[in-house]
Structure formats: C-alpha cells, structure tokens
C-alpha cells in the first residue's frame, strides 16, 4: 500500500453497505417502476403467457382483484396494452379507440377503483390492424405516414378523454408527437395529459414474447422501415431531439440493456425531460432464463440490470419485474 498514490485508494469509500449505497447518483425507488399490463376483450380472462414468466392477459372482471395487492405494496403507475381477440380487425385499426374496447374500459375501471394510480396507455395500431403493422398502408404495402399519424393521434385523444393520465405512442411514425400534442391541446387536454414518446425505439430481436402476449406480429414483412436500426446512434439522437421539440413530455428508449448508451444520450440531449426506458419482454425473459439455468441469482441480476439503467440516466423504468421490486424495495 505504501507505493500507492493517496488518490488511488478507493475501497475505503465503499467498504460498508451504507457507504456503497451513497455511490449511486440515485437509488431505485418504487415510483421509478411502471408496470406493463395486457388487457384483453375476454372479461374473465386470466391467461398465462408462456414466454413471459409470471405475466398474464387480464380481462376487466379480473383486473381489480389483480391490481389491489400491488397498489397496497406501493404500485404507482401502469401502462396498458390492448389485446383484442374477439373483435374484427381492419386496415385502419378501428377497434383501437372503441368506447367499449378493453383499454378504454380498463382506464375507467382503474380510475374508479384506484384513483391515485397513474395510468399510461400505449398508443399504436398494430394490435388492431388486420395486417399487424403500426400504421395505415399504401397499396404496395408501405406505410402511408400522413393518415397513419392522423389515426394514431385520434386514438391518443380518445384515451385522454377516457381518463388516461399519459399517452405513449410506440409506432415510430414521423410527426406523430406534434400531431398528438396538437389534438391534446385542441381537446382541452394539453395541460392535463402527459405525452411520453417512444423516441428511440429500435428494431430489436427482443420483442418476441411481447408479440406473443399482444398478438401483434406483422402478417408480412417487418417494422425495420420505421423502427430504428440497432447501430443507428445518430438517428436515435436525432429522433430524441425531434420528439422533444415536437412537444414530448417524457423521452423513452426501447429496449434498455443493449441501448444504455442511447439512454445516456437522451439524458444528455434532453436534460430537462424525464428519461424512460422499457426493459422489454426479451430482456425480462432472458434474465429469468439465465437464473433458471443457474447462471446467476434472479434478484441480483434484476437489480443489476435496473441499476444500470438508472446509472445511464433513466428516471422511469417500464418493467415486468415491477411486482418483484415492490417487494424487494421494502428492505
């Protein structure tokens, strides 16, 4: 030790558990976790999703019973994904803003049963179109951007009218943030509803379990023409700035672990915005698979992954581990 410079001796600063807790700029808190929930149009559904451990599709009649113990444990926010199985889908995604559809009815139920629970709604068309893409199509199968944006903004406005606290467009269409913000303002919701943009959403291999859960796989082609290429750091930075300038209130990066640098970029580019990240279905499933194979302890790895996101700059984590963290963060 005598040969070390004084500035080289670091371990004294983190030799105690309390001292280690001071090394992070922010610690994990229950309020950081938003729970993704799949709402289906079978009112009595409680359907296991095999590729997503411990997750289910929920019907309206089961939702209050499911949420109540989580709210008691400190759940503060959810994001709803509609999974329509019994409706007639079409090229416009007409069921997306059906007043009797699962999402709008779930918003009203949650507002009634849990008035303090923050409700975000994913805004997209892929679960509701007969082709499974996130917008309206031209005759050649390509995305027709302008009517897609108009339709998506109508859906966002419908969720706002139903009582959602936050609308979160995940479609990655150019210009949809400005269009949604305009419709929120024109509808009297500009100061009442948060606009959380999936600003840097990448064309990832990690969405498979989600597409099983939501039944949203495209019937042809893929989404690489509108989701970002995985290597496209510059495009992600441009999209983040664009969405912030168009009126996004929260900037999101999706997925999380392979894109920690993009989370850090978002925190640098938009330091005055909350930064969200989505620990997507494939990330969640991989952590479970590794734990089941004995590679690591599940809780330890879940913490490590979440702490890496916070370290990169995230202030909000959308995660299927939310119920576990409501227990783990008790101690």
Image (cartoon, rainbow, N blue to C red):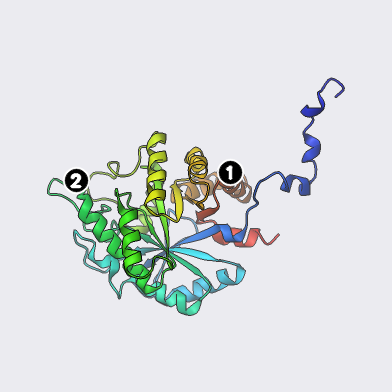
Q: Residue at x 51, y 76 (%)?
A: 114
Quarter of the figure with residue 331: bottom right
**Element on which disc 1 rests:** helix
Residue 125, percent from left and from top: 28, 58
Residue 167, percent from left and from top: 39, 62
- Report the residue marked by disc 1: 308
Q: Residue at x 39, y 49 (%)?
A: 245
Is 241 located above or below residue 32 in the figure? above
Q: Residues within 10 Å of mark 2 (few under 14, many from 20)?
A: few
Residue sitting at the far top: 3
Residue 22, percent from left and from top: 73, 47
Residue sitting at the far right: 2
Is 230 located above or below residue 183 in the figure? above
Disc on the earlier residue, 1 or 2: 2
**Element on which disc 2 rests:** loop
Residue 85 seen anywhere in this rendered image of the structure: no
Q: Nearer the viewer, residue 136 or 298?
A: 136
Quadrant assignment for the N terminus: top right
Q: Is residue 138 left or right of residue 288?
A: left
Residues under numbered marks 1 and 2 in contact, where contact means CB atoms less than 8 Å apart: no
On residue 142, which mark appears? 2
């Amino acid at each position: 030790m005598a040969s070390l410079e004084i500035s080289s001796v670091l371990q004294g600063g983190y030799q105690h558990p309390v001292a280690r807790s001071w090394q992070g700029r922010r610690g994990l808190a229950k309020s950081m976790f938003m729970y993704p929930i799949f709402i289906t149009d079978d009112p009595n559904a409680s359907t296991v999703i095999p590729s997503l451990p411990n997750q289910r599709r929920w019907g309206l009649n089961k939702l209050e019973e499911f949420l109540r113990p989580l709210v008691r444990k400190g759940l503060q926010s959810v994001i709803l994904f509609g999974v329509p199985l019994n409706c007639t889908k079409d090229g416009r995604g007409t069921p997306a803003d059906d007043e009797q559809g699962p999402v709008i009815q779930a918003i009203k139920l949650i507002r009634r049963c849990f008035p303090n629970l923050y409700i975000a709604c994913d805004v997209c068309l892929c679960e509701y179109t007969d082709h499974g893409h996130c917008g309206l199509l031209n005759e050649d199968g390509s995305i027709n951007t302008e009517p897609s944006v108009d339709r998506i903004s109508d859906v966002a406005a419908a969720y706002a009218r139903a009582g959602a606290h936050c609308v979160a467009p995940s479609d990655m269409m150019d210009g949809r943030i400005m269009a949604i913000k305009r419709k929120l303002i024109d509808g009297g919701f500009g100061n009442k509803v948060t606009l959380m943009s999936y600003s840097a959403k990448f064309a990832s291999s990690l969405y498979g379990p989600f597409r099983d859960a939501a039944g949203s796989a495209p019937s042809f082609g893929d989404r690489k023409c509108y989701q970002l290429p995985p290597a496209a750091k510059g495009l992600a930075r441009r999209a983040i700035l664009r969405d912030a300038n168009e009126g996004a209130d929260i900037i999101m990066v999706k997925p999380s672990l392979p894109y920690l640098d993009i989370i850090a970029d978002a925190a640098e580019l938009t330091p005055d915005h909350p930064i969200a990240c989505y620990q997507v279905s494939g990330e969640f499933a991989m952590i479970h698979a590794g734990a089941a194979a004995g590679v690591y302890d599940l809780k330890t790895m879940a913490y490590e992954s979440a702490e890496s996101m916070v370290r990169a700059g995230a202030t909000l984590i959308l995660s299927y581990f939310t119920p576990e963290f409501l227990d783990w963060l008790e101690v």
